[in-house]
């Protein structure tokens, strides 16, 4: 495998941000000897005497004309939505295309801007946008722009709601070509699957412009809706309509930007709006890519549970680093799928077809888990009627046997604060040797890790096949599929039982058709932290069980409810005891 040269071709010279605002061009200088550190110092830095070659990107060329290009392809949903608020769909489409072009210009400026626009938060070692400086720049640009007869209500969310601005920037290198990243971002199904820990629901409303050529996205403009979530029912989801625009900015440089088209009345603001957000993708040597990601939103966080307030209101819960970390995990997973036959860490040789099967099954398991624990409207969460407990209940019904349990199932979930670092919590819950300390179902069983498929560079990240062996009979009572993943922005351990007698995982059946009931843990830091600091943890626990005798479509039986309440309470108590502190 070719190794990405992290230092090759690093951008070190940028011009274009000045006292008059975000300028209309950026000047890129390529330096053959940059530093390797990927913190805020890895972002483009001004230099007094440029070396190498220069490529000037005329950003005015990006925003001066509507995007309507080679193929105007609005489907019935997109056309109907546009026509619902305007007698002329072309007028609405032109407005969206102009806003998308301007958003690409602003994203490019934000990617390469330095202080005072971007400031380093030393407490969390992240870059944050200065709201005061940003609004000053916006006002300067508005004064320099020609007058328009259109009413621009793009900032109407701020005075209407008690909103805050969240902004962040992150840089990472990937051992994959830019087209793979672009295709992932522009394909709704791939994007929502890869970012299932952030995206609860996504819909492609319409394609307003495209090349019509497969894997060629230059100039593609899509209209989308999405629901973004944190891994807990106690954090409200963020719903947004936005345009996604892909543009080739220069040779070896692409941009993908999202922006909420708030200038149109058919896209009302609720609690969340995307300012120009997205990434610039630069082609690097050896088939690698450099990604600079910017998240910039305004949001109303008043309904966030007090446990999560410090993490969410700081902007860390939905920061650019979280998106980048998820993208890293996805491409590591893709590389693992492509690996030929090889022994696992436990010496069990799994042929490549079965490895693919395990990984696909695990991918669907993890996506289902995050869907189950999100605050999505589809989950219809209700608090359990017991004082002093933040246990939430969501009941689901299915009449379709395509990968789901027929009948009624119930998810029981809670989030608790633990005064220990998230790494410590993750290590305890992931280690099979400690499982019987917290697993109420497995108190009379010994667990072992029959096989393990490593995913990425960290030995903590991977897919396991666990066996529950009865202490008395020494027989295998159950098999579990488990996936674990640790990152600075959040970790998870997800597991689900599968039928040992039928042993479907060893057959040539596709994992999409196997019913699955995932349970597990999501672990977040309780506040933004610097890499060398420690903090507490926010642990979300969820159990997905079959509700055999529901009394109502959305209420489990009292017997099941109190049983699961006791199990969750005992699980929390056992975890605390295993971590070495009393309740």
Image (spheres, helix red, strand yellow):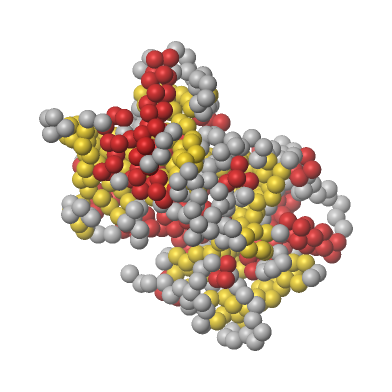
Q: Position of residue 350 (x, y in %)?
A: 20, 51
Q: Which residue extends farthest top? A: 551
Question: Which of the two residues, 13 or 388, is positioned nearer the viewer here?
Answer: 388
Q: Position of residue 535 (x, y in %)?
A: 50, 50
Image: 46 above or below 214: below
Q: Is residue 315 left or right of residue 131?
A: left
Q: Which residue extends farthest front? A: 582
Question: Which of the two residues, 300 or 9, is positioned nearer the viewer here?
Answer: 300
Image: 211 above or below 427: below
Image: 412 above or below 550: below
Q: Position of residue 236 (x, y in %)?
A: 59, 36
Question: Which of the two residues, 321 or 224, is positioned nearer the viewer here?
Answer: 321
Q: Position of residue 155 (x, y in %)?
A: 77, 48
The residue drawn where x is 29% and y is 39% is 435
The residue drawn where x is 46% and y is 24% is 395
The residue drawn where x is 57% and y is 86% is 52
The residue drawn where x is 65% and y is 77% is 46
Q: Is residue 502 visible?
A: no
Q: Is residue 133 visible?
A: yes
Q: Is residue 481 left or right of residue 124?
A: left
């Amino acid at each position: 495998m070719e190794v990405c040269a992290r230092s090759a071709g690093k951008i070190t010279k940028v011009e274009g941000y000045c006292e008059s605002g975000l300028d209309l061009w950026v000047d890129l200088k390529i330096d053959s000897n940059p530093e390797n550190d990927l913190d805020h110092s890895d972002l483009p830095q001004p230099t007094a005497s440029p070396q190498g070659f220069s490529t000037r990107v005329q950003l005015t060329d990006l925003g001066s004309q509507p995007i309507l290009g080679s193929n105007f392809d609005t489907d019935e949903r997109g056309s109907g939505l546009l026509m619902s608020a305007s007698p002329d769909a072309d007028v609405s489409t032109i407005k969206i295309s102009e806003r998308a072009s301007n958003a690409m210009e602003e994203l490019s400026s934000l990617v390469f801007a330095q202080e005072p626009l971007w400031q380093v938060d030393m407490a969390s070692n992240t870059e944050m946008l200065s709201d005061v400086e940003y609004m000053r720049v916006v006002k300067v640009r508005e004064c320099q722009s020609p007058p328009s007869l259109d009413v621009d209500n793009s900032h109407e969310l701020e005075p209407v709601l008690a909103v805050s601005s969240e902004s962040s920037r992150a840089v990472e290198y990937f051992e994959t070509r830019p087209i793979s990243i672009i295709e992932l971002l522009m394909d709704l199904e791939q994007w929502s699957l890869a970012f299932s820990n952030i995206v609860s629901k996504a819909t492609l409303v319409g394609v307003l412009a495209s090349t019509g050529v497969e894997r060629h996205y230059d100039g593609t403009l899509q209209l989308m809706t999405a629901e973004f979530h944190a891994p807990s029912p106690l954090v409200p989801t963020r719903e947004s309509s936005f345009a996604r625009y892909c543009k080739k900015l220069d040779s070896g440089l692409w941009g993908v930007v999202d922006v909420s088209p708030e200038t149109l009345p058919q896209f009302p603001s609720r609690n969340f709006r995307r300012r120009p957000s997205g990434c610039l993708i630069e082609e690097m040597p050896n088939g690698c890519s450099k990604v600079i990601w910017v998240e910039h939103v305004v949001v109303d966080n008043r309904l966030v549970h007090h446990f999560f307030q410090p993490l969410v209101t700081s902007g860390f819960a939905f920061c650019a680093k979280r998106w980048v970390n998820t993208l890293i995990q996805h491409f590591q997973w893709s590389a693992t799928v492509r690996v030929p036959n090889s022994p696992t860490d436990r010496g069990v040789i799994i042929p490549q077809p079965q490895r693919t099967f395990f990984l696909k099954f695990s991918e669907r398991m993890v996506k289902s888990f995050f869907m189950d624990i999100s605050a999505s409207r589809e989950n219809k969460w209700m608090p359990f009627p017991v004082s002093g407990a933040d246990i939430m209940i969501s009941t689901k019904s299915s009449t379709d046997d395509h990968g789901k349990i027929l009948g009624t199932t119930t998810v029981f979930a809670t989030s608790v604060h633990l005064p220990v670092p998230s790494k410590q919590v993750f290590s305890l819950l992931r280690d099979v040797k400690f499982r019987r300390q917290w697993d109420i179902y497995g108190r009379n069983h010994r667990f072992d890790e029959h096989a393990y498929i490593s995913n990425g560079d960290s030995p903590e990240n991977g897919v396991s096949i666990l066996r529950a062996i009865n202490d008395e009979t020494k027989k295998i009572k159950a098999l579990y599929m488990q996936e674990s993943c640790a990152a600075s922005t959040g970790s998870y351990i997800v597991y689900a039982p599968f039928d040992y007698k039928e042993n479907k995982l060893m057959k040539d059946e596709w994992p999409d058709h196997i019913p699955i009931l995932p349970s597990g843990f999501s672990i977040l830091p309780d506040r933004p932290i610097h890499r060398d600091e420690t903090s507490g943890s926010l642990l979300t626990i969820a159990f997905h069980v079959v509700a055999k005798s529901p009394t109502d479509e959305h209420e489990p039986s009292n017997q099941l409810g109190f049983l699961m309440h006791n199990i969750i309470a005992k699980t929390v108590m056992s975890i605390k005891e295993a971590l070495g502190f009393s309740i």
